[in-house]
Image (cartoon, rainbow, N blue to C red):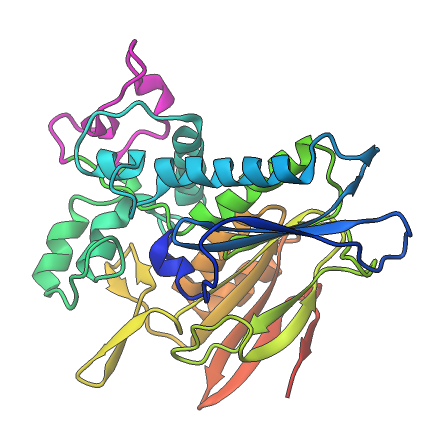
């Protein structure tokens, strides 16, 4: 769902180091000359890991390992300074505070992706519902348990339906834009945005785009979400563990429902769920997945959705979509999309069950 893009999402990992470093090693491969490296770093309040083959499409890559590491760090730093709601100096934070900003290409690009997804999903994916996420305590503030009146009040000033579909035509001669410029109705309340539903997937895609530009053909980019292409160091498909969606399971990989082997083609792989971020009041669980159409947390049996798409941004978005609409609608959605594969894990009277699309093979662990 609307997952935490910076500290709150990344802190689920155990951070043992506070500086970027490179591990370069020759690993087994079906081709003798293949050399894989793992680049890890500390960024945006947590860690990332990028595995890649130094034997690129045309032989040697056009950048050395140290340069690759520095470039990845710079990319993630730029994204944090643009799109993070937890970085108080970021463009997004300043925009939400009502400041005039000079948007960079990252901000302009992700906004347009978000608007397309808003229209495609009939408002189910809505980055301009940030005030709702804040109201329930799952955005950039810690409020919780709002009254129905509060929900109605906030919904009246939320949503991308109030906004222009692109920021670019609104930019002034000096390159700046005011938040209120985005509002269709003159004098309307300024919008607040939250890109958490797509920002980590988008980050993976931006890093992958850089890796392609220097000639990488085999890669796995892990920034909380996954983008991968080609083969792993063993010459096999990249394999990923799908976490068992047990409430409070905040340690990825500690409890695995099954293993999924990615296709060799470029793809994003993202899992969204309600088992890591929620709170309980008076015996009732309030999930962090908010339906922008109702303003309320969702209540259904679907516990997690893992989506495979052509890129990580779309996988991130559609995983969120499935978590909003629930099990039955998510099944119909995946069955109608030949470009997507997915695995839905749900509660069946206290037991974990999984449903997978035709092309998603989950090797379940017992």
Q: Assign the C terminus to one quadrant of the image.
A: bottom right
Horizontal arrangement in the rendering, residue 72 relative to residue 9 (left or right): right
Boundaries of the magenta span: 162-189
109, 159: nearer the viewer: 109
Q: Quick check: 114 above or below 131?
A: above
Residue 31 visible, this orientation: yes
Which residue is painted at 74% across and 56% down in the image? 263
Which residue is painted at 26% across and 55% down in the image? 139
Residue 117 figure quarter: top left
Q: Position of residue 224 (x, y in %)?
A: 50, 57
Q: Assign the N terminus to one quadrant of the image.
A: bottom left
Q: Position of residue 15 (x, y in %)?
A: 45, 62
Q: Quick check: 43 above or below 283?
A: above
How would you classify the magenta stretch by its main secondary structure?
A: loop
Residue 209 is one of the magenta-drawn residues: no
7, 111: nearer the viewer: 7
54, 123: nearer the viewer: 54
Q: Position of residue 331 (x, y in %)?
A: 54, 67
Q: Position of residue 211 (x, y in %)?
A: 65, 38
Residue 221 visible, this orientation: no
Q: How many marks?
A: 0
Residue 163 is one of the magenta-drawn residues: yes
């Amino acid at each position: 769902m609307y997952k935490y893009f910076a500290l709150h999402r990344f802190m689920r990992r155990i951070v043992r180091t506070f500086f970027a470093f490179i591990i370069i090693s020759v690993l087994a491969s079906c081709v003798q000359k293949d050399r894989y490296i793992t680049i890890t770093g500390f960024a945006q309040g947590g860690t990332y890991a990028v595995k890649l083959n130094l034997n690129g499409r045309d032989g040697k890559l056009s950048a050395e390992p140290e340069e690759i590491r520095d470039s990845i760090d710079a990319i993630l730093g730029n994204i944090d300074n643009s799109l993070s709601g937890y970085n108080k100096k970021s463009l997004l934070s300043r925009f939400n505070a009502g400041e005039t900003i000079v948007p960079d290409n990252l901000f302009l690009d992700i906004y347009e992706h978000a608007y397309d997804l808003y229209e495609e999903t009939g408002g189910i994916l809505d980055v301009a519902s940030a005030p709702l996420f804040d109201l329930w305590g799952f955005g950039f503030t810690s409020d919780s348990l709002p009254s129905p009146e509060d929900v109605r009040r906030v919904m009246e000033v939320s949503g991308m339906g109030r906004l222009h579909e692109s920021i670019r035509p609104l930019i002034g001669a000096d390159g700046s834009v005011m938040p209120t410029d985005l509002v269709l109705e003159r004098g309307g309340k300024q919008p607040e945005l939250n890109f958490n539903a797509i920002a980590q997937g988008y980050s993976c895609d931006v890093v992958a785009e850089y890796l392609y530009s220097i000639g990488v053909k085999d890669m796995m980019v892990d920034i909380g979400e996954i983008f991968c292409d080609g083969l792993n160091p063993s010459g096999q498909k990249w394999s990923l563990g799908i976490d068992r969606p047990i409430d409070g399971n905040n340690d990825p990989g500690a409890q695995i429902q099954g293993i999924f082997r990615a296709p060799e083609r470029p793809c994003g792989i993202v899992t969204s769920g309600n088992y890591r971020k929620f709170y309980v009041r008076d015996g009732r669980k309030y999930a962090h997945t908010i339906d922008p159409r109702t303003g309320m947390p969702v209540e259904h049996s679907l516990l997690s959705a893992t989506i495979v798409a052509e890129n990580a941004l779309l996988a991130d978005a559609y995983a969120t979509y499935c978590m909003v609409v629930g099990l039955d609608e998510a099944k119909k959605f995946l069955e109608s999309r030949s470009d997507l594969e997915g695995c839905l894990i749900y509660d069946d009277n206290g037991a974990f069950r999984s449903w997978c699309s035709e092309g998603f093979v989950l090797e379940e662990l017992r």
